[in-house]
Image (cartoon, rainbow, N blue to C red):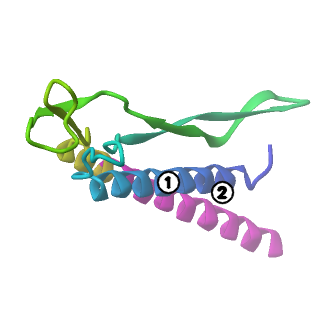
Amino acid sequence: MSIFNGLQINASGLALERLKLDTVSTNIANLNTNQTRNSAAYHAKSVVFSENMKTSLNNGPTSSGVKVLGIDENLDRNLKYAPTNEAADANGYVEQSNVNLSDEMVNMIQAMRTYEANVSAQEANKSILTKALAISKN
């Protein structure tokens, strides 16, 4: 295990939270992107991730942060009865965006706080490494 593993773990967490914030902002921006004659309604997206395990010869599997597996799309349909809409189906329904603003705000706050926690942990790691270097100079 390297002394820089903590910084690598924090960096992967920061990158993940940034991607989550980008995804949330895209969802919020497309809150009112509904079905038209030429395009489908926007479906909310979310980031799928997991722990990134690495195998070392001496210690076996160890964590090296997180990795993004992909971006998932919520395919739940949100239909509104609007028979006069030109995009309505045979039953008079138009698909609307399935983005829930309240859920997206909660996701944004959670991502921001997790990002801040990763920044704090990274600063602590840098401080520890700086002190270790100072000790080695003496």
Mark closer to the chain start, 1 or 2 = 2
On screen, residue 119 versus residue 138, left or right, reads: left
Quadrant of the frame with the C terminus = bottom right
Give the label, 1 or 2, closer to the camera: 1
Q: Nearer the viewer, residue 62 or 15?
A: 15
Residue 29: mark in rendering: none
Query: Up-down: is 106 above or below 49?
Result: below
For the record, the magenta segment spans 110-138
Q: Foreground residue, 8 or 76?
A: 76
Q: Position of residue 6 (x, y in %)?
A: 66, 51
- Name the residue: 48% across, 58% down: 18
Give the distance between the C-alpha atoms of the residues marked 1 and 2, in whole angstroms. Answer: 18 Å
- Residue 113 or residue 80, whichever sits in front: 80
Going by the image, does 14 lie left or right of 104?
A: right
Assess whether residue 70 is covered by the magenta stretch: no
**Magenta stretch contains residue 127:** yes
Residue 113 seen in the figure: no
Q: Amino acid at mark 2?
A: Leu
Residue that mark 2 sits on = 7
**Badge 2: how crowded within 10 Å, few (<14), some, or many (20+)?**
some
Q: Amino acid at mark 1?
A: Leu
Q: Residue at x 69, y 64 (%)?
A: 129
Q: Estimate the x, y position of residue 93 in percent, counting from the top left.
A: 16, 31
| Magenta stretch, overall SS | helix
SS label for mark 2: helix
The residue labelled by disc 1 is: 19
Q: Is residue 75 visible?
A: yes
The picture places residue 61, in percent across and down from the top left corner, at 77, 27
Figure check: 65 above or below 3: above
User: In the displayed structure, does residue 104 sit left or right of residue 13?
Assistant: left
Q: Which residue is rendered at x = 80% and y = 49% of the image?
A: 2
Q: Quadrant of the N terminus?
A: top right
